[in-house]
C-alpha cells in the first residue's frame, strides 16, 4: 500500500492531454506559426527576447486551429548557452503586434518560474506559472 512505502516522491501523471509545441514543426503537419522567432517587448517597449515556442492544446471538434495557452519567451545567454525560458500565459501576450508585446515588465518576467523545454510541462508547472502571473488557469475558466 502507498502508506507503507518508505521515502521518495509519489509521481502521478497528468490525466489531461499534453500541450503541443508549435514552433519548429515545419514538415510536421503544417507551416510554423508566424509568431515563432519574433521579437518580444515589455509593457514599456523594452526589448526582452524572442518567442521560442507556443504551447497549445489540441484543436476542438468545431475548430481546426489549436488554442495557444502559453508563449515561451527566450532571453539572455550567449550562442544558446545560458538562455532563460519563461512560459507566459497567452492572455499576458499580444501576438498581433510586431514586435510582440507583453503586458508586464522585464523585471517581472525575469523573476518568473523557469520553463525547461526538455521536460514535460505538467499541471504542477502550469499552476505555478498561473499563480506567479496572477492568471486563472484555462481549464478553470
Image: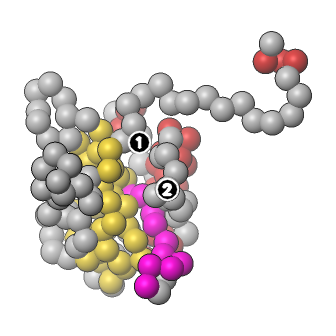
Could you tell me which residue is drawn at 50 percent across and 38 percent down?
123
Question: Could you say which quadrant of the image residue 19 lies in?
Answer: top left
Q: Is residue 116 left or right of residue 104?
A: right
Query: How far is mark 2 from mark 1, CA to CA?
Result: 25 Å
Point 16% across, 45% down: residue: 29
Secondary element at image label 2: loop
Range covered by the magenta-colored residues: 79-88
> What is the x, y in percent for residue 49?
35, 78
Could you say which is closer to the camera, residue 32 or residue 49? 32
Please, what secondary structure does the residue beneath circle 1 have? loop
Residue closer to the observer: 60 or 111: 60
Task: Give residue 31's position: percent from left, percent from top.
Answer: 12, 56
Q: Assess whether mark 1 and mark 2 are in contact (beta carbons under 8 angstroms).
A: no
Q: Is residue 95 above or below residue 61?
A: below
* Residue 5 in the figure: left or right of residue 93: right
Where, quadrant-wise, is the N terminus in this rendering?
top right
Q: Is residue 83 magenta?
A: yes
Q: Is residue 61 above or below residue 84?
A: above
Q: In the picture shown, does residue 82 fall above or below 25?
A: below
Indicate the quadrant where residue 73 lies.
bottom left
Residue under pointer 1 = 136
Residue at image position (37%, 61%) is 72
Chain-order first, disc 2 or disc 1? 2
Q: Position of residue 101 (x, y in %)?
A: 25, 70
Which label sits on residue 123?
none
Which quadrant does the C terminus fall into? top left
Which image quadrant is residue 10 in?
top right
Q: Nearer the viewer, mark 2 or mark 1?
A: 2
At x 15% / y 74%, what residue is drawn? 98
- The residue under label 2 is 118
Badge 1 density bin: few <14, some 14–19, many ≥20, Cα 10 Å = few
Amino acid at each position: 500500500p502507498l502508506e507503507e512505502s518508505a521515502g521518495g516522491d509519489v509521481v502521478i501523471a497528468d490525466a489531461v492531454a499534453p500541450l503541443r509545441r508549435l514552433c519548429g514543426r515545419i514538415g510536421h503537419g503544417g507551416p510554423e506559426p508566424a509568431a515563432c522567432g519574433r521579437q518580444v517587448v515589455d509593457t514599456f517597449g523594452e526589448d526582452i527576447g524572442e518567442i521560442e515556442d507556443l504551447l497549445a492544446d489540441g484543436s476542438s471538434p468545431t475548430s481546426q486551429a489549436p488554442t495557444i495557452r502559453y508563449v515561451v519567451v527566450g532571453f539572455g545567454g550567449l550562442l544558446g548557452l545560458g538562455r532563460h525560458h519563461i512560459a507566459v500565459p497567452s492572455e499576458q501576450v499580444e501576438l498581433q503586434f510586431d514586435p510582440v508585446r507583453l503586458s508586464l515588465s522585464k523585471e517581472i518576467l525575469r523573476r518568473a518560474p523557469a520553463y525547461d523545454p526538455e521536460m514535460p510541462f505538467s499541471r504542477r508547472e502550469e499552476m505555478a506559472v498561473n499563480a506567479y502571473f496572477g492568471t486563472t488557469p484555462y481549464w478553470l475558466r
